Image (spheres, helix red, strand yellow):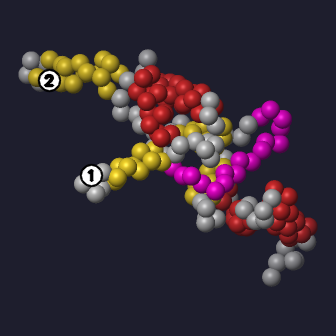
Amino acid sequence: MEMAGIVTKTGADLIVQARKLIEQIGRPLELDTDGIWCILPGSFPNIFTFELEDGGTFRLEYPCIMLNADVHDNFTNHQYQNLKDPVAGTYETNSECSIYFELDGPYRAMILPASTEEGKLLKKRYAVFNFDGSLAELKGFELKRRGELELIKTFQSQVFEHFLDGSSLVDCYASVADIANHWIDVLDTRGESLD
């Protein structure tokens, strides 16, 4: 098997295995080739900070420890070869695992658009917001693409600014709907309503 195929398959197997573990305690939202966006219960242990005798601290991110232990158990290469003697061409066999999960977040919200077709999922299209309301990550939207119409980019930019409005889903929808209605009016009037 070609090396690229091995890397791709190992990555896919690793994410599937991690998803199964996450499903036991929370809910995966988006799977990517390099990680998982998920919701964990508020009661789930997250970050522990230990005070050391020398006055320093040691931070332990429990979700990472849990996922990395699973990776170590299932994806360690026990046949890893290190060149011991280049002249004699001898190698030393040991175990190697250089794949690690890292923790990002927590975040205030993640917006995942729904597909217009039933049963069809949209991939790599989401917006993640920090607790201060700023965008932490934006993936797959026209706002980030070169060559898209400026009208679409402006519309999306304004919509993203209002995704966190209100204290309920109804309030959020109403705020976003106001933006959408404005841009429908712009289109209907062929731009006459613009300043």
Compared across the picture, whether 98 is left or right of 117 comes to left
Residue wearing tag 1: 53
**Which image quarter is the C terminus in?**
bottom right
Q: Position of residue 119 (x, y in %)?
A: 80, 32
Q: Which mark is residue 31?
A: none
Instruction: State which mark lies toward you, 2 or 1.
Output: 1
Instruction: Name the amino acid type tagged 2.
Output: Lys
**Crowdedness near tag 1: few (<14), some (14–19) or many (≥20) residues, C-alpha within 10 Å:** few
Compared across the picture, whether 71 is left or right of 24 comes to left
Which stretch is magenta?
104-120
Question: Outermost residue, front direction?
Answer: 53
Tell which of 183 and 134 is nearer to you: 134
Q: Quadrant of residue 75?
A: top left
Above or below — where is 15 with respect to 43?
Answer: above
Residue 109 seen: yes
Residue wearing tag 2: 84
Instruction: Name the amino acid type tagged 1.
Output: Glu
Total numbered labels placed on residues in the image: 2
Q: Position of residue 51 (x, y in %)?
A: 34, 52
Residue 149 seen: no
Indicate yes or no whether the magenta region holds residue 116. Answer: yes
Q: Position of residue 97 (x, y in %)?
A: 35, 29
Above or below — where is 188 with respect to 137?
Answer: below
Residue at horizontal 54 percent and vertical 26 percent from the top: 17
**Crowdedness near tag 2: few (<14), some (14–19) or many (≥20) residues, C-alpha within 10 Å:** few
Residue at horizontal 64 percent and vertical 37 percent from the top: 26
Question: Outermost residue, bottom direction?
Answer: 195
Residue at horizontal 57 percent and vertical 29 percent from the top: 21
Indicate yes or no whether the magenta region holds residue 177. Answer: no
Q: Position of residue 36 (x, y in %)?
A: 57, 39
